[in-house]
Image (cartoon, rainbow, N blue to C red):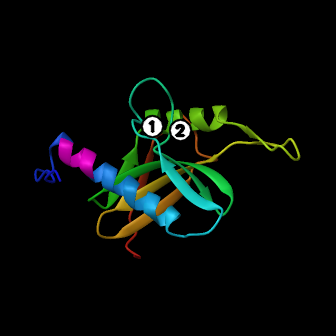
Amino acid sequence: MARKPSNPNSPRYRARLGYEGEYSLLRKFVEVGENGFYAIRTPGSGSGKMAKPDMLAVDGGELIAVEVKSSGKSYAMLNSEQVSRLMEFVKKFEVKCPHCGERINPRPVAAIRFVGRGWRFVDLSKHSPDKGLIVRWDGDG
């Protein structure tokens, strides 16, 4: 197994931190062990021209598109491009119910892992797609 990068300023360290955050959240969905709770990672999100989230998940039967961030600080930021790409994906990724014909789009969610502290989840449904986002850890585990 490859060694973890030790320099917190290196790109490899930040990439590893991001991967571990995504994988940790993926396990949270999968380990529920019930129908209606599952997730898949979409490797390469944020790269290239195609808008796609870090993860697609089903949370209690609801489809969500998740942008995952990991931070060792007391805050984390999503820039306006990250928010815009997630919103573009949510708009284009439309599923039609075969029974009633209703069109369903995933709900956009930012999942922030504050390393050693816990998770914060932010529903971006009503967030402006052209604005970034700052999420702060408020200290209540």
Q: Nearer the viewer, residue 108 or 55?
A: 55
Q: Nearer the viewer, residue 95 or 85?
A: 95
Q: CA gap, disc 2 to disc 1?
A: 6 Å
Q: Are marks 2 and 1 in contact (CB under 8 Å)?
A: yes
Q: Is residue 97 left or right of residue 40?
A: right
Image location of residue 32, percent across then percent down: 54, 70
Image location of residue 121, percent across then percent down: 50, 60
Q: Residue at x 56, y 36 (%)?
A: 129
Q: What stretch of residues is rendered in magenta?
A: 12-16
Q: Is residue 33 left or right of residue 11?
A: right
Quarter of the figure that contains the C terminus: bottom left
Residue at which label 1 appears: 82
- Dot 2 lies on which element? helix
Q: Residue at x 80, y 44 (%)?
A: 97
Residue at which label 2 appears: 86
The image quadrant of residue 123 is bottom right
The image quadrant of residue 138 is bottom left
